[in-house]
């Protein structure tokens, strides 16, 4: 019984340590491999990680952004920012997030059960509010697919200026160094 109690105590201490070292994971986003579907080609999907960039949708309000990481990460929070001349009505409202699903198409993103679904308020996107994700669902993340399904004002175009992930990197899992076997 005392061994079980000490294991529970160390597990709780580990969780507390995780909370204390929660960090901005931007440096682990593999910006060279960020891709998107239905984006205005005059904007750059990778620009929204690590600063105020811009990605806009093209033919309608939906955007599908695939974000690979250079290391396996654990994600606890995410923030979205939509600042610019496009106006708050074009900022994302309904966002679905899929873990480790790099090859999704729009139809699948609409129909599949997301790892998380967020309904963003105008305050969330104006102030880049950190939104909590269910930490247990976002362990061992190699990539995230972000599906912007709708925007605040049912506009024809959606846009984002920044996305930031907060959590932990798992040491020793640099995805850039993985080689194909055989």
Image (spheres, grey):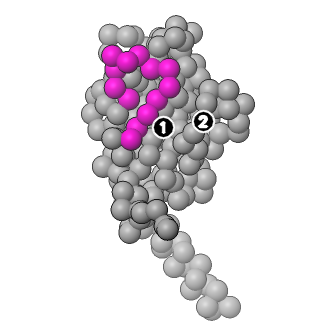
Residue at the farthest bottom position: 2
- In this orientation, does residue 148 appear? yes
**Which residue sits at x=61%, y=30%?**
105
Q: Is residue 142 left or right of residue 101?
A: left
- The residue beneath circle 2 is 104
- Does residue 14 appear left or right of residue 113 in this picture? left
Tally the numbered discs: 2
| Residue under pointer 1 | 66
Residue situated in front as seen by the camera: 29 or 22: 29
Q: Is residue 10 left or right of residue 56?
A: right
In front here: 64 or 130? 64
155 in relation to 98, above or below = above
Identify the magenta region: 33-45
Residue at the far front: name it.
182
Which image quadrant is residue 167 in?
A: bottom left
Check whether the beta carbons of the residues at disc 2 and disc 1 lie within 8 A of each other.
Answer: yes
Marks 2 and 1 sit apart, C-alpha to C-alpha, by 9 Å
The image shows residue 59, relative to residue 159, as above or below, that is above
> Residue at coordinates 44% horizontally, 46% vertically from top-left?
68
Q: Secondary structure at mark 1?
A: strand
Q: Is residue 23 above or below residue 177?
A: above
Question: Residue 123's spot in the image, x, y percent?
Answer: 45, 24
Between 177 and 165, the one lying in front of the other is 177
Q: Earlier in the sequence, mark 2 or mark 1?
A: 1
Residue 21, by quadrant, is: bottom left
Residue at x-position 52% and y-position 7%: 156
- Magenta span has 41? yes
Residue 24, can we see it? Answer: no
Magenta span includes 123: no
């Amino acid at each position: 019984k005392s061994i079980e109690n000490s294991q529970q105590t160390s597990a709780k201490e580990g969780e507390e340590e995780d909370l204390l070292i929660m960090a901005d994971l931007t440096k682990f986003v593999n910006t060279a491999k960020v891709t998107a579907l239905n984006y205005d080609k005059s904007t750059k999907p990778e620009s929204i990680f690590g600063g105020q960039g811009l990605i806009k949708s093209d033919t309608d309000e939906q955007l599908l952004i695939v974000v690979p990481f250079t290391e396996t990460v654990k994600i606890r929070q995410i923030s979205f920012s939509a600042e610019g001349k496009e106006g708050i009505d074009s900022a994302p409202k309904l966002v679905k997030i899929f873990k480790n699903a790099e090859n999704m198409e729009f139809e699948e993103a609409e129909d599949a059960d997301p790892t998380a679904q967020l309904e963003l308020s105008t305050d969330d996107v104006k102030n880049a509010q950190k939104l909590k994700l269910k930490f247990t669902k976002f362990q061992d993340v190699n990539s995230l697919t972000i599906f912007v399904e709708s925007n605040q004002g049912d506009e024809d175009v959606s846009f984002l200026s920044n996305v930031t992930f907060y959590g932990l990197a798992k040491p020793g899992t640099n995805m850039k160094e993985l080689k194909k076997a055989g």
